[in-house]
Image: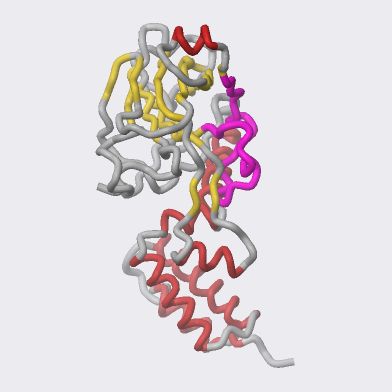
Amino acid sequence: MREKLLYTAQVKALIDKVAGLDNAEGDQRLKKIVARVVTDLMQTIEDFDVSPTEFWAAASYLEKVGMSHEMGLLIPGLGLEHFLDLRMDQEERAAGLIGGTPRTIEGPLYIEGAPLSKGEARLDQDPETGEVLFMDGQVKDAAGKPVAGAIVDVWHANTAGWYSHFDQSQTPFNLRRRIETDEDGRYKFRSMLPAGYGVPPDGPTNELLAAIGRHGKRPAHIHFFVSAPGYRKLTTQINIDGDPLLHDDFAFATRDELIPAITHHTDPAEINARGLNEPFATITFDFTMHKEAADLPKAVVERAHAA
């Protein structure tokens, strides 16, 4: 049997040189990470007999992902963003922190600086046809006490599955708001029931997913950041119950605790009381936050956002 090239002294010395392990300069932890990544790539090449042509095709693919600004789609599509959430969950449990509203992925479509309202807001500022949604709830601590002054930062797609800022046909901050909870920790907003979306069909993310027999679609959902002084920032989202892709999300973001009941109202008296002419939907969802502590893993994830 042919000797594994990876295990030869020549390649081991090459990896040490590549990662800077042959000198005392630089970041020692980063050196070990680079060595591991390079080693694992070399092992993949050897184990699967990856040809030079295949290797450079993969390199070109990553260039396409970058040029298409789809890294924020590819990472959740490969399960890596969900894996990071699972690791944070594990670290919190190990530190004795249990319960609370589950986290789930942020996704790539957040925009900073949405308008701030107190207590309630209307998210839909562009006219569109669909089902009106009224959502409300309370932000509480682990003991069930209301958290007044918490900021509920909410964003979601329109009825066609497009997000403002990335879809130039929408006005700035359409379907994006920040809501400061009232003295009872309550928030509420009016919006339109969103649709799910899919990755660009001709983009590199879909190219890879199709090649491995997967789709690139997400069920309808609504994103949230929930933050308050002295509390751990919560990154989460709810899914719209009844969506056919509810448990087949290409980004692996669905968690059972984040599927609240949705009520569709068709009674004419209820419709009239809301000042509407068509049926509407309601969702109630409470967020439970944990207080911050020095011995807990960092809850705030620093990442670049579109500007």
Q: In the rendered image of this protein, does residue 19 appear above or below residue 153?
A: below
Is residue 29 or residue 55 the one in the foreground? 55
Is residue 201 located in the magenta-colored stretch of the structure?
A: no
**Residue 56 appearing in the image:** yes
Residue bounds of the magenta highlight: 238-264
For the point 56% across and 53% down, the residue is 79
Is residue 241 located in the magenta-colored stretch of the structure?
A: yes
Coloring scheme used: secondary structure
Image spot of residue 91 (x, y percent): 55, 39
Main secondary structure of the magenta stretch = loop
For the point 54% across and 46% down, the residue is 218
Tally of numbered tags:
0
**Residue 32 appearing in the image:** no
Image spot of residue 283 (x, y percent): 53, 21
Image spot of residue 50 (x, y percent): 58, 83
For the point 60% across and 87% down, the residue is 5
- Left or right, 16 with reference to 181: right
For the point 34% across and 15% down, the residue is 149
Q: In the rendered image of this protein, does residue 80 appear above or below residue 25?
A: above
Is residue 250 or residue 150 the one in the foreground? 250
Query: In which quadrant of the rendered image does the N terminus lie?
Result: bottom right
Image spot of residue 184 (x, y percent): 41, 7
Farthest residue, direction bottom: 2
- Left or right, 176 with reference to 105: left
